[in-house]
Amino acid sequence: MRTEQNTNDAPLNALLVLPHLRVQNANAISSPLTWGFPAITAFTGLMTALERKLGPQAGLTLHGVGVVCHDFEPQVTKGGFTRSFHLTRNPLLQDGGTAAIVEEGRVHLDITLVFDVELALSQSGEVERTLLAQHTGELVRGMRIAGGTVVPALPGTTRNPPRPQLVLLSDAVAERLKQFRRLSRRWLPGFSLVSRDDLLQARQIEMQAIQPGATLLDAWLDLSRLNHRAIRHKTVDEKTGEARETTEWSIDSRPGWTVPIPVGYAPLTALHPPGAVDGARDANVPFQFVESVYSIGQWISPHRLNDVAQMLWQPSHDPATGLYRCLNAFRPSSVPVHHIA
């Protein structure tokens, strides 16, 4: 989130809010190791695609995106501890044979998207901002979000359906915080996904005190599961003097609603020139094989955040290493960034 002061001819800092988007059949398999809510890279990809559709003539530049989830309905079997995805049968082959079933995870979502944007001075008026927000909302309704389809709100669910809006941010810190508090109350009930890299690093230090060879992967796996531990208690019977041993099972507590999440991609090979790899989706751009990068995230109610910058994710790319990483400001700036690839 940018906080510099605006000059008379500089773009204005603003928030583009797309409230309560209903998405059907979004991709629930967010990486080779995780499932559930779509990866944050799906929303940074949406941000890039949306900026291209708007074009430079729109006077809108997108820098970051925040996600608030209001409803999450995975398309899985009901009942029992073990669940499986609802799968679809593909059309028959040309010879009449049965096509193979490819496992696909789907989820229905109700989300609010918050974009950190720079707004041209020509679009700073209230009428211009209203028209631009409506135009942007119409574009998003015709796009895919994490592979899912944006559908209109159910009729009769609300008298005044929320509309997209462009909100100019004040240069004064105190006033900007008031603006965020007013907006965050409109996003309730819901939860915003933020980064908790600090928890991952802290757990690795705790594990290394017991297992010196513990890695970030060990810490990530430890935070990604429910750990049941046996605590032994020794007692002595006062009457017989007999020693007894009992076992009590406990579950490790968690610092909030934490989840394992993919946050980007790390390169596996060098960058191939356009058209050098057969079967690439686009033969006009360079191609590179990559693997997912993982970290720990946390779902937090928006009204518990101090500033909108804490909920925004911004993509970053390191040309030297080829690492594509989504960064979030909720993590304390004094903690170094690590990742698991």
Image (cartoon, rainbow, N blue to C red):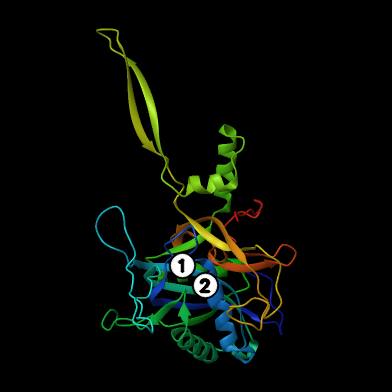
Q: Is residue 175 or residue 123 the one in the foreground?
A: 123
- Please give the label number shown on residue 77: none
Which residue reaches farthest top? 240
Pointer 1: what residue? 38
Q: Earlier in the sequence, mark 2 or mark 1?
A: 1
Residue 186 in the image, given as x and y percentages of width and height: 41, 71
> Which image quarter holds the N terminus?
bottom right
The three-letter code of the residue at mark 2 reads Phe
Q: Is residue 19 or residue 54 the one in the foreground?
A: 54
Which residue reaches farthest front? 95
Horizontal arrangement in the rendering, residue 216 relative to residue 246 (left or right): right
Which residue shows up at 64% across the image and 53% down it?
338
User: Would residue 326 be visible to someone looking at this image?
Assistant: no
The residue carrying pointer 2 sits among few (fewer than 14), some (14 to 19) or many (20 or more) residues within 10 Å by Cα, namely some
Which residue shows up at 38% across the image and 81% down it?
93
Q: Is residue 331 or residue 152 the one in the foreground?
A: 152
The three-letter code of the residue at mark 1 reads Pro
Residue 259 in the image, given as x and y percentages of width and height: 46, 55
**In what element is the residue under mark 1?**
loop
Residue 156, quarter of picture:
bottom left
Residue 112, quarter of picture:
bottom left
Residue 210 in the image, given as x and y percentages of width and height: 56, 32
User: Would residue 207 be visible to someone looking at this image?
Assistant: yes
Where 147 falls versus 337 (above or below)? below
The answer to whether the residue labelled 2 contacts the one labelled 1, judged by CB atoms less than 8 Å apart, is yes
Horizontal arrangement in the rendering, residue 50 relative to residue 94 (left or right): right
Residue 211, quarter of picture:
top right
> Which image quarter holds the C terminus?
bottom right
Where 240 falls versus 201 (above or below)? above
Residue 107 in the image, given as x and y percentages of width and height: 37, 69
Pointer 2: what residue? 43
